[in-house]
Amino acid sequence: MIKRIVLVLLLAVAAGVAIGAVARFGLPRWAKQQSGEPADVATNTRVYTWSEAVDKVKADRGEPAGVNARVEVPPELKHYTERHWFLATQVAEVARHNVRTCQDYMDLAGMIQRGEMVSVPGVTESYVLFGVGQQTNDEVFSRYEDDHSVELYDQAQLSAAYKTLNDKRAKLNSDIESLKSQAAKLTRRERSKQRELQKQIAAAQGELNSVDEDKAQLDEFYGGVESREQLFRDYDSLQALAKNFNGHSYDINSPSDRQALKLNMLSSLRPQALKVLEEVATAYHRQFDRPLPVSSLVRPEQYQRALRRVNRNAVMIDTPPHSTGLAFDIDFRYMTAAEQSFVMNELARMKTDGRIEVIRERNANYHVFAFMDGTRPSDDLITASLEDAGGPLPETHHAAPAKRASRKKAEKKTTKSRHARSSKSAKTSQKKSRKRHR
């Protein structure tokens, strides 16, 4: 009898321990399988290192690739008859949703902090960042206003910058006076020496003018109390971001850290664009077992200007598409004809569905622009954006009926006037918005 009671008690204790274990850790693997809940089984997914992914991208396929491959480009990836219609479509999307653009890294930092941009991993199973941020440098972070850059300093660094400029100025003035004194002592027969000294004087004077311009720019941006305090706040904000950015800490006073931080910031997109990228990459990887090479993501206008020096395809308009964070580029240099056709057909389908604008560029890239809500702007809004895209009002284009020629001159003037007011209002609104978010 006693043995039975002890046995019952032991069973009860064991049952209690089992129930507690399930409550804390969940069902064991065999129980999950019997209950229908999926077990944590190993998968066949392959996560590459960045180097492995690049090797997969560049691997020789044994047949022509890139621009040497013979492909039929779908009409959806070709230019419109009115070539500015492509850019105007993207400008129209910015106007339609009042999309914030980034002028410089500080603007981009703010968009990242507010969650408007999300970080894009350097490598995943389905895509790899291949060439993103190649033109980054280790220069001091700066604000970019009206085509001018002003470096960001704290109080001590600003004082040091002024001292450096004043020292340079004093030395150059001294050098110029010395050269002039030497020239004055020469005789008329020493013409070759006079010419050489004059060249040196002109070169030193040019350096002096450059120093004076740099000082005048510092005075312009740091001279006023309000402007100076705002720039100090920008510096503090950037420093705070750098201390904890994607789990890494960067010293913005270190050139190598500055360059690494810039590269990390350029690896960002808006969620709407990242969703499109992931969809295309997943389809490509499933078909060819290779990661999709992505060569460009967000690009602040400041970076775009620098990029223009080495890449003539970098767009220079008031609203460059990449500065919105809605655009990205796919590199097809190493793709075979079959791979290119597959990717282009995927992109053409998305464009037909009204989700993106896209074009096949001559520098072996597909430029993709995602629409914020997955719908294309109206033709009327695109027409109104043509001037901002660098083009005239269209006569015809393949996206709308050919009825522009019948418009009256008065209607054209009204459209231009309305567009000019709209464009000016949008730019003023963005400038005010930037000031509020600094």
Image: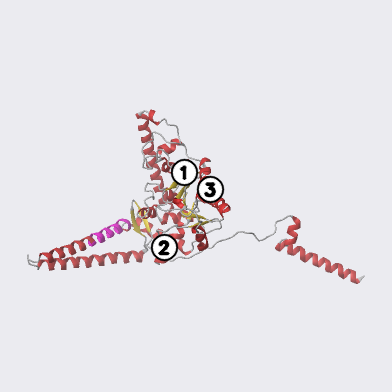
Is 193 placed above or below 328 here? below
Q: Residue 53: where, in percent of width, then height?
A: 52, 60
Residue at the spot of label 2: 259
- Point out the tag, 3 or 1, that comes first from the N-terminus: 1
- Point out the tag, 2 or 3, that comes first from the N-terminus: 2
Q: Residue 248: where, in percent of width, then height?
A: 49, 64
Count neighbours of disc 3 (C-alpha within 10 A) and say few if under 14, some if 14 to 19, many if 20 or more.
some
The disc at residue 100 is none
Which SS class for mark 1? Answer: helix
Dividing the image into 4 quarters, which one contains the N terminus? bottom right
Under mark 1, the amino acid is Leu
Q: Are marks 3 and 1 in contact (CB under 8 Å)?
A: no
Under mark 3, the amino acid is Phe
The disc at residue 77 is 1
Answer left or right for 410 relative to 279: left
Q: Residue 407: where, in percent of width, then height?
A: 38, 29
Residue at the spot of label 3: 342
In the image as oriented, which residue stretches furthest toward the front?
62
Kindly report the distance in space between the C-alpha atoms of the residues bearing marks 2 and 3.
Answer: 36 Å
Comparing marks 3 and 1, which lies closer to the viewer?
Answer: 3
- Point out the tag, 1 or 2, that comes first from the N-terminus: 1
Q: Which residues are magenta?
A: 207-221
Comparing marks 2 and 3, which lies closer to the viewer?
Answer: 3
Q: Is residue 308 or residue 247 the one in the foreground?
A: 308
